[in-house]
Image (cartoon, rainbow, N blue to C red):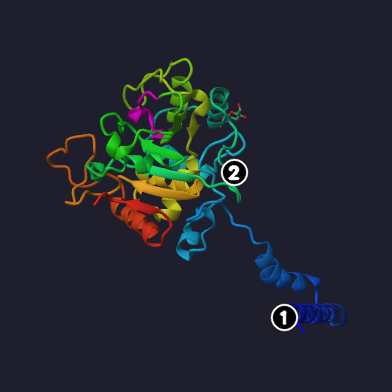
């Protein structure tokens, strides 16, 4: 008997035995199905969760990651997910208290009369491989020659006023997403997605106004009233996402995560592979921005949990969940 034929016979015998067991011993069908699902069917029909060669982030089986990563928390506000629990709304209102008595529901309705309200980036599947570069503002980018490597990603995310011009060889040319809040905003070209990081309801009112009639001229201080940016590409981070990052990843330490850490978390949730550039200190242990002279007394981050955020980024890197480029 040939090997193949023997295998066939064994299979038929096993199948008969299984059917016999199910019918004669009345093993519940669900048990049988469960057995089949976990072994045979799963191995035979297993599809890769994404099309990337290196990794598919959301499908990682790393325990440490799975304990923290919640795929069901949408990073972006949309018409269908804008509802906020009372507790998160109250927490959010305390971040940068303003006297705004505006009605959240109405503010959101107005927002989505100016920018698109559909769900974005919920498109993970076996044919998608989305690679993302998160570019922080650290001085460790200077002299790194990371530019071409950064530009090689599908999405390149930058934050606040971080310039590209004059630093291209180290930071790249491309910007697909720029994460900003009113007080840190700059004008954008029409290809770049504006991603608002809202610390208060007034920030959402500001983006609505800044992309339409320009009626809001101050938040905590004087801000850009009419922003050059493509309103069809604008989006807003979800306050509940900011809360999740703080609660689940940072264990509620301090009041809120740093912008850089939030952008990294945003990338983890919408990309299949994430590379991180321009985070942390330079080779001499100093923390500063690549585009500014370092203030004399400036040593570490101000009000953010820099230590814990830094540990988590290292952990993500050590567990091979992200690629971390430190420039040295
Ligand atoms: C906010 O506005 C909505 C819709 O206009 C209304 O149904 C709701 O009662 C308002 N909430 C408060 C707290 O005023």
Q: Which residue is mark 1?
A: 3
In the image, is residue 54 part of the stretch drawn in magenta? no
Q: In percent of the image, x 46 and y 27: which residue is there? A: 191
Residue 168 x %, y %: 30, 34
* Secondary structure of the residue carrying numbered label 2: loop
Residue 210 x %, y %: 44, 21
Query: What segment carries the magenta color?
Result: 178-188
* Secondary structure of the residue carrying numbered label 1: helix
Instruction: Determine whether 2 is above or below 202 in the image.
Output: below
Q: Decide if residue 157 is on the left or right side of residue 13.
A: left
Instruction: Determine whether 234 is above or below 301 in the image.
Output: above
Q: Decide if residue 309 is on the left or right side of residue 193.
A: left
Q: Which residue is mark 2?
A: 123
Q: Would you identify the image quadrant in which residue 150 lies?
A: top left
Q: Residue furthest front?
A: 2
Q: Decide if residue 209 is on the left or right side of residue 277.
A: right
Depth check, front residue: 97 or 212: 212
Q: Would you identify the image quadrant in which residue 226 lies?
A: top left
Residue 100 x %, y %: 44, 27
Q: Is residue 325 visible from the viewing direction of this image?
A: yes
Ligand 1 falls in quadrant? top right
Q: In percent of the image, x 38 and y 53: which residue is there? A: 323
Q: Is mark 2 within 8 Å of ligand 1?
A: no
Q: In percent of the image, x 32 and y 39: which residue is there? A: 147
Q: How many marks?
A: 2
């Amino acid at each position: 008997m040939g090997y193949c034929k023997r295998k066939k016979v064994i299979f038929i015998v096993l199948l008969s035995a299984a059917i016999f067991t199910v019918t004669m011993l009345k093993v519940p069908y669900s048990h049988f199905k469960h057995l089949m699902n976990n072994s045979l069917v799963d191995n035979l029909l297993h599809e890769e969760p994404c099309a990337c060669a290196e990794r598919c982030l959301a499908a990682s089986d790393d325990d440490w990651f799975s304990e923290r990563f919640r795929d069901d928390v949408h990073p972006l506000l949309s018409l269908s997910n804008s509802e906020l629990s009372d507790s998160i709304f109250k927490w959010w209102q305390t971040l940068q208290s303003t006297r705004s008595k505006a009605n959240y529901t109405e503010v959101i309705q107005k927002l989505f009369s100016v920018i698109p309200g559909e769900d974005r980036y919920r498109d993970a599947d076996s044919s998608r491989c989305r690679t993302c570069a998160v570019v922080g503002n650290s001085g460790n980018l200077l002299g790194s020659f990371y530019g071409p490597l950064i530009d090689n990603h599908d999405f390149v995310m930058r934050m606040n006023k971080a310039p590209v011009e004059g630093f291209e060889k180290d930071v790249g040319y491309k910007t697909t997403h720029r994460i900003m809040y009113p007080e840190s905003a700059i004008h954008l070209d029409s290809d770049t997605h504006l991603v608002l990081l809202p610390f208060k309801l007034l920030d959402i009112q500001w983006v609505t106004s800044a992309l339409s009639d320009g009626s809001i001229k101050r938040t905590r201080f004087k801000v850009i009233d009419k922003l050059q940016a493509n309103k069809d590409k604008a989006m807003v981070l979800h306050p509940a996402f900011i809360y999740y990052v703080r609660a689940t990843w940072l264990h509620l330490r301090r009041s809120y995560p740093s912008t850089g850490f939030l952008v990294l978390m945003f990338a983890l949730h919408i990309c299949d592979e994430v590379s991180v550039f321009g985070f942390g200190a330079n080779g001499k242990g100093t923390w500063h921005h690549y585009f500014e002279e370092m203030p004399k007394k400036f040593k570490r981050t101000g009000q953010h949990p820099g230590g814990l955020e830094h540990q988590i980024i290292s952990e993500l890197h050590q567990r091979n969940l992200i690629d971390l480029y430190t420039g040295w």
